[in-house]
Image (cartoon, rainbow, N blue to C red):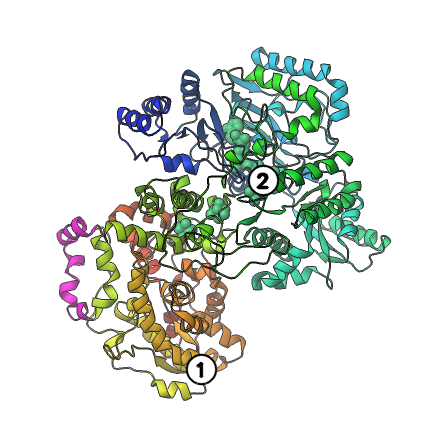
């Protein structure tokens, strides 16, 4: 099938013609009918199909097309069309499966955008009925006020959908207390591939076709009783194959409290191969009111593993988790400033491993007693004083965060070798855990790799991913390790697939696990429910080999197209050693795209960028919920473009479309577990795109603003006419694309750069005992000079001698400096470099003397610590970056050193509550604590941080007519409503564009923190 592009067509006929020409006749007909018969999104372009060709596994299978139903009943319509055209169907939720379950050749049906409602909540019965596309966190957020939750707490709770969780029979960290999905699903309404909609619930009460299916499966269970009892792993965590044992329970925990058969359990874990779920009825649990945590420190990993079986017996029903963090993860966490302090609160000395043992319930006193039992048990086991007891909520929460972050760091290994998930969830009975982990570690060593162990010690499911290079000998090693691991699993009577399901990766191991007879029974179940073989064919039944490289993302034909990059990506262009995890020097990784491709390939599709909780990533996805507008969709589009799987490469319209709504907030740089930095990638891509297609007028106007600002500011009345005459604004919109609805920043004749007030000279500051250099950017300098003056006043009031940085070049001595950000925003890297160079040259002498360079606008100042370092500006950039700080960072550090005592005595008490909105780049650099601390220098200041993502203005993004609506929606997601809610508060926002958005959306004037402090100084 060729991969030529299909742009968004309008009519069904056009759809047909385009799709048929690009793919084939069937694809054309399928797209046409979907377009005619539904209101859903019909995504058949090469880029869309490529974006849905992968999940969080190593596989890639390009589907015929993608359908995103707008209404739930359209799923049935799409299925009917597929039936007519004999096109296979691949159901999909968040696409976070690790084994390739959602990759397939047919029509992918994505439920996560629209099919995500809570249908019925029955608190008395303790049940909820939901549509399959709802994410677990979204469901639990809606249940919280009722004191209940759905307790299958998978790590991907923010992005995993209930449909996907049921599909995979997912299991959470607390499965020892609550069981797996199969223990918590009470019913499912689902379509068979022939279109019948069935109610799968209690077998006893069922009728019609559902009853008949039940009878059929029961017969099979009876027929295979001996095999079932001999071959079925007797552990909690077995998710392979179909749940034939619902009629003869082999799980250590009964599927139902009364032992009666629930037919929905047949669908749980069937990975979309038996039926398409329309809704699920779930059992709710009470939210635990109290939790305590005991952190057991071990000086041997083996001992930790050996102890799990004894710890698991504690708690009198209150034990909810026993989670492992091994030595490697402890060390990684200790290296991160943000987590070092927390992990230190949990460790005693230098442990080889720790176990996080959680007890939860309604009575804290009882839980404390259980904690004492843990201490006593460890004492009896020869480990006195090995338990750190955490009774308060905050330290417990912090420690769980560290446990998650450790995994993220492990995943961020640069180079072609990656931790690969294929035996990551084998489950063994607890009494064999120590021997199993020991033996498997030796297997890794034998194959020149190593694994970091973590997670669910309570249920014998430890996660481990050996590092393999899937472009080279990875597939062979994967096979060899899998075979040895499976022998161990068999020896210890465990389950080879204990959490993540079968998919492409473990399909072939189903027969190995259960034997040919039960495997045949599974095939009969598939045939009985889906005789047309339409639902994800060749997965759980007749699967391909796990190491079939033609199905892999980095298969045999994967090649990167050579390109010359504008930015320096060499930090990613490395090789790594799987055994030591050491990487080679930057630039040695042989990436034909000079490291850009390897940076893009860091995305492993885990889908964290689809989350909606705190944090910044990803504002555009939060508004559109489109795969193309998630960081993952963008990274996948770039990977396809760089590897020649998308015609036109980086200069194609598909790449432009994927990056169009990226606001460059750098949220992903911080929040993405593998550090995919899409903001930087967008600069690179725009460079390539604009080099080929030319720079739009709006970008020329905006990027050159620092160049013409000194002239424009001399004609403020003329320049501001556009804001006063609506017709002029409309005219301007028609040729610049900048929305007439937005006001532009007001020019002023008197501004910071032409004011009479000056700081000390360069010589004076270099000789000063309390020196600081103030870098005033174009925006604060020309449009909001009061902020620059305020910063100057506050620093002076604190006793600093302030030098205002200005150009030193012969051609423009004394003129204002610019970091080049406006050029970067449109990919003009060489022009940005010119400006950055002038700035660095001016700042270098001060940085060399160790003097702090203080800036006000986060996006400008932080350019010195980010993009300036990758523009080929050499050591000078490193030296300046080491001393470039935001105003509040500087003050927070100085305060810690006790240098602000005199300033503090001068500040008058706060009169109003303070609402704080963080600029995305402040958040990306983890700087929000410093601004909070600085506000608290004001006596009686009460500051509330608004939990918001990007404000939506993002430089010029929100000014553009084509982005206006999305920009407003981003702001309305939480920022503006929070401000409207607190009418009496003073709003602090350091970003120029954030302040503008707040003014436009709420008519409230937000202020820079420097101005806030200055207003509390004596007049
Ligand atoms: C970093 C990471 C951590 C993880 N941690 C855990 C963990 O703690 N516990 C755990 O169990 N798993 C974990 N997983 C695996 C994965 O996140 C879970 O299995 C998750 O529940 C999948 O949800 P999803 O919405 O992404 O489903 P998808 O991947 O989209 O789909 C899962 C399966 O369900 C099927 N399906 C989806 N919707 C329907 C429908 N409407 N009808 C029928 N079938 C459907 C799909 O075809 C597929 O077979 C992890 C994965 C990653 C990447
Ligand atoms: S961009 Fe980051 S968060 Fe999103 S899927 Fe890729 S790796 Fe995960
Ligand atoms: S920079 Fe921001 S908008 Fe762009 S992909 Fe990353 S999180 Fe999303």
**Residue bearing mark 2:** 475
**Residue bearing mark 1:** 849
Picture quarter with the C terminus = bottom left
Q: Is residue 387 left or right of residue 51?
A: right
Q: Is residue 363 left or right of residue 541?
A: right
Residue 805 tag number:
none
Q: Is residue 715 magenta?
A: yes
Residue 130 x, y percent position in the rendering? 52, 30
**x 31%, y 52%: residue:** 688
Q: Nearer the viewer, residue 500 or 25?
A: 25
What is the secondary structure assignment of the residue under circle 2?
A: helix
Residue 552 x, y percent position in the rendering? 51, 37
Q: Nearer the viewer, residue 459 or 807?
A: 807
The mark nearer the N terminus, 1 or 2, is 2
Residue 526 x, y percent position in the rendering? 58, 19
Q: Quadrant of residue 7?
A: top left
Q: Is residue 173 left or right of residue 737?
A: right
| Nearest to viewer (mark 1 / mark 2) | 2
Q: Is residue 833 magenta?
A: no
Q: Is residue 169 above or below residue 457?
A: above
Measured in 3D between alpha carbons, the distance from the residue under mark 1 to the one under mark 2, in whole angstroms, is 53 Å
Q: Is residue 837 visible?
A: yes
Tell me the magenta residue range: 711-738
Q: Quadrant of residue 754?
A: bottom left
Q: Crowding at label 1, few (<14), some or many (≥20) Cα neighbours within 10 Å?
A: few
Q: Nearer the viewer, residue 579 or 605?
A: 579
């Amino acid at each position: 099938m060729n991969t030529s592009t299909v742009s968004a067509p309008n009519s069904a006929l056009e759809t047909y013609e385009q799709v048929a020409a690009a793919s084939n006749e069937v694809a054309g007909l399928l797209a046409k009918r979907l377009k005619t018969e539904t209101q859903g999104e019909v995504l058949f372009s090469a880029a869309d199909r490529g974006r849905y060709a992968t999940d969080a596994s190593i596989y890639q299978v390009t589907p015929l097309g993608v359908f995103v139903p707008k209404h739930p009943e359209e799923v049935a319509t799409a299925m009917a069309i597929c039936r007519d055209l004999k096109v296979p169907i691949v159901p999909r939720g968040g696409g976070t499966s690790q084994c390739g379950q959602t990759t397939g050749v047919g029509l992918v049906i994505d439920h996560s955008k629209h099919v995500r409602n809570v249908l019925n909540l029955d608190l008395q019965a303790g049940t909820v009925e939901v549509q399959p596309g709802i994410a677990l966190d979204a469901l639990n957020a809606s249940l919280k006020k009722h004191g209940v939750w759905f307790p299958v707490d998978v790590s991907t709770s923010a992005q995993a959908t209930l449909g996907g969780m049921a599909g995979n029979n997912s299991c959470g960290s607390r499965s020892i207390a609550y069981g797996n999905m199969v223990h918590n699903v009470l019913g499912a309404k689902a379509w068979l591939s022939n279109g019948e909609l069935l109610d799968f619930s209690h077998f006893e009460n069922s009728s019609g076709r559902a009853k008949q299916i039940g009878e059929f499966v029961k017969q099979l269970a009876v027929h295979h009783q001996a095999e079932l009892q001999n071959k079925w792993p007797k552990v909690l965590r077995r998710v392979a194959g179909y749940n034939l044992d619902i009629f003869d329970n082999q799980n250590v925990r009964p599927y139902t409290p009364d032992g009666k058969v629930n037919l929905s359990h047949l669908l749980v874990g069937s990975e979309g191969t038996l039926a398409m779920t329309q809704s699920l009825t779930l059992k709710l649990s009470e939210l635990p009111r109290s939790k305590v945590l005991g952190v057991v420190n071990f000086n041997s990993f083996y001992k930790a593993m050996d102890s799990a079986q004894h710890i698991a017996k504690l708690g009198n029903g209150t034990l909810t988790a026993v989670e492992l963090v091994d030595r490697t993860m402890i060390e990684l966490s200790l290296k991160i400033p943000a987590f070092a302090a927390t992990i230190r609160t949990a460790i005693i000395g230098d442990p080889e491993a720790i176990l996080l043992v959680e007890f939860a319930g309604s009575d804290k006193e009882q839980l404390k007693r259980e904690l004492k039992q843990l201490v006593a048990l460890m004492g009896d086991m020869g480990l006195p004083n090995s338990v750190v007891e955490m009774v308060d909520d905050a330290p417990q929460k912090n420690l769980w965060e560290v446990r998650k972050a450790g995994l993220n760091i492990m995943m961020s290994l640069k180079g072609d070798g990656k931790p690969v998930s294929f035996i990551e969830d084998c489950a063994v009975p607890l009494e064999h855990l120590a021997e199993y982990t020991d033996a498997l570690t030796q297997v890794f060593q034998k194959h020149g790799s190593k694994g970091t162990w973590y997670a669910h010690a309570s249920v014998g499911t430890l996660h481990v991913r050996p590092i393999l290079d899937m472009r080279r000998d990875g597939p062979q090693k994967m096979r060899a390790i899998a075979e040895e691991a499976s022998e161990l699993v068999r020896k210890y009577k465990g389950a080879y697939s204990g959490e993540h399901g079968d998919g492409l990766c473990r399909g072939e191991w189903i027969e190995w696990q259960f034997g040919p007879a039960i495997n045949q029974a599974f095939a009969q179940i598939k045939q009985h429910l889906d005789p047309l073989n339409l639902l994800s064919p060749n997965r759980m039944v007749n699967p391909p080999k796990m190491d079939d490289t033609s199905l892999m993302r980095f298969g045999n034909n994967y090649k990167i197209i050579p390109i010359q990059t504008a930015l320096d990506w060499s930090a990613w262009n490395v090789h790594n050693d799987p055994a030591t995890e050491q990487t080679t020097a930057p630039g040695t990784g042989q990436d034909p795209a000079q490291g850009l491709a390897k940076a893009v390939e860091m995305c492993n599709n885990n889908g964290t960028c689809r989350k909606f909780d705190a944090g910044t990533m990803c504002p555009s996805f939060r508004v559109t919920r489109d795969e193309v507008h998630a960081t993952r969709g963008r990274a996948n589009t770039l990977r396809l473009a760089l590897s020649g799987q998308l015609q036109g490469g980086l200069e194609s319209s598909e790449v432009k479309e994927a990056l169009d709504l990226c606001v460059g907030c750098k949220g992903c740089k911080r929040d993405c577990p593998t550090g995919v930095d899409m903001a930087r990638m967008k600069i690179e891509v725009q460079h390539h795109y604009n080099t080929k297609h030319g720079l739009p007028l709006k970008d020329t106007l905006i990027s050159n603003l620092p160049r013409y600002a000194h002239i424009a500011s001399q004609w403020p009345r003329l320049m501001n006419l556009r804001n006063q005459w609506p017709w002029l604004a409309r005219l301007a919109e028609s040729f610049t694309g900048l929305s007439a609805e937005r006001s532009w920043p007001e020019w002023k004749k008197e501004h910071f750069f032409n004011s009479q007030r000056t700081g000390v000279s360069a010589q004076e500051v270099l000789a000063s005992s309390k020196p600081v250099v103030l870098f005033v950017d174009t925006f604060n300098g020309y449009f909001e000079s009061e902020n620059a003056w305020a910063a100057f006043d506050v620093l002076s009031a604190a006793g600093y001698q302030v030098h205002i940085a200005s150009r030193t070049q012969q051609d423009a001595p004394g003129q204002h400096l610019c970091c080049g950000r406006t050029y970067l925003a449109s990919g003009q890297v060489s022009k940005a470099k010119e400006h950055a160079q002038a700035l660095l040259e001016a700042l270098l002498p001060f940085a060399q003397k160790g003097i702090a360079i203080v800036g006000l606008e986060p996006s400008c100042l932080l350019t010195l610590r980010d993009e300036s370092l990758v523009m080929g500006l050499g050591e000078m950039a490193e030296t300046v970056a080491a001393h470039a700080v935001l105003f509040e960072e500087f003050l927070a550090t100085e305060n810690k050193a006790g240098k602000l005592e005199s300033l503090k005595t001068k500040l008058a008490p706060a009169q109003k509550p303070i609402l704080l909105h963080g600029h995305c780049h402040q958040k990306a650099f983890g700087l929000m604590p410093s601004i909070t601390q600085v506000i608290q220098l004001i006596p009686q200041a009460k500051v509330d941080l608004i939990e918001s993502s990007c404000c939506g203005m993002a430089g010029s993004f929100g000014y553009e007519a084509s982005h206006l609506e999305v920009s407003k929606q981003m702001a309305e997601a939480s920022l503006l409503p929070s401000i409207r809610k607190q009418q009496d508060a003073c709003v602090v926002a350091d970003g120029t564009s954030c302040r503008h958005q707040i003014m436009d959306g709420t008519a409230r004037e937000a202020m820079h923190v420097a101005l806030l402090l200055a207003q509390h100084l004596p007049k």
